[in-house]
Image: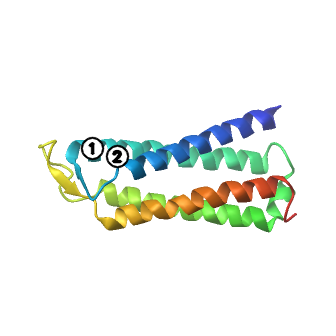
Amino acid sequence: MLAAIVGGIHLLLVLALVVGILVILLASAEQVSAQDLLAIQRVYKLTGVLLVLVAIAGLILWLWVGKPAAFYSNNPVFHAKLGLFLLLGALFSYNAYRVHHLPGTHTTDPDALIPLGNTHRRLQKALIPLLIAIPVLAYLMARGIGY
């Protein structure tokens, strides 16, 4: 029962994480107003919290509830999924750091345009294949492939 609850929470957190990343991608442009940038920064913070909560729920599933830890620890598909998740976290964190430290973010004019640059959108788009690959690997892993 506990495994189903934690698994459900993990799944809901993953879905919220995907929504947060997609919202950031859709809200980002080459130049955004200071007010929009503030909203994007808030979504980055919330999505960062979701990223940590997904990792915690995944650790609980891996080490304490559900299938034995050896089922996951000895599975190369799990290690590939874990590596992609860490890459997603690193790319997301770097992008969040860049957005929070843009020049001109502390302007008093809410309509002032602040350039995000192409690198921001490229890094954001690089997260999309990871968001597709990780659930596929999770499905394969849950079915016992690689064990």
Residue 50 visible in the snapshot: no
In the figure, is residue 56 to the left or right of 99?
Answer: right
- The residue under label 2 is 40
Left or right, 144 with respect to 46, comes to right
Asked if residue 100 lies left or right of residue 22, the reply is: left
In the rendered view of the protein, which quadrant contains the N terminus? Answer: top right
Q: Is residue 72 above or below residue 35?
A: below
State left or right for residue 44 relative to residue 53.
left
Disc 2 secondary structure class: helix
Q: In 3D space, how far apart are the residues under numbered discs 1 and 2 (Cα atoms)? A: 6 Å
Residue at 76% across, 53% down:
139
Residue at the (64%, 66%) spot, across then down: 83
Residue 121 visible here: yes
Label 1 with label 2: CB-CB less than 8 Å: yes
Q: Which residue does the image show at 51% across and 60% down from the upper left?
A: 127
Give the residue pinned by disc 1. 36
Residue type for callout 2: Ile
* Amino acid residing under circle 1: Asp
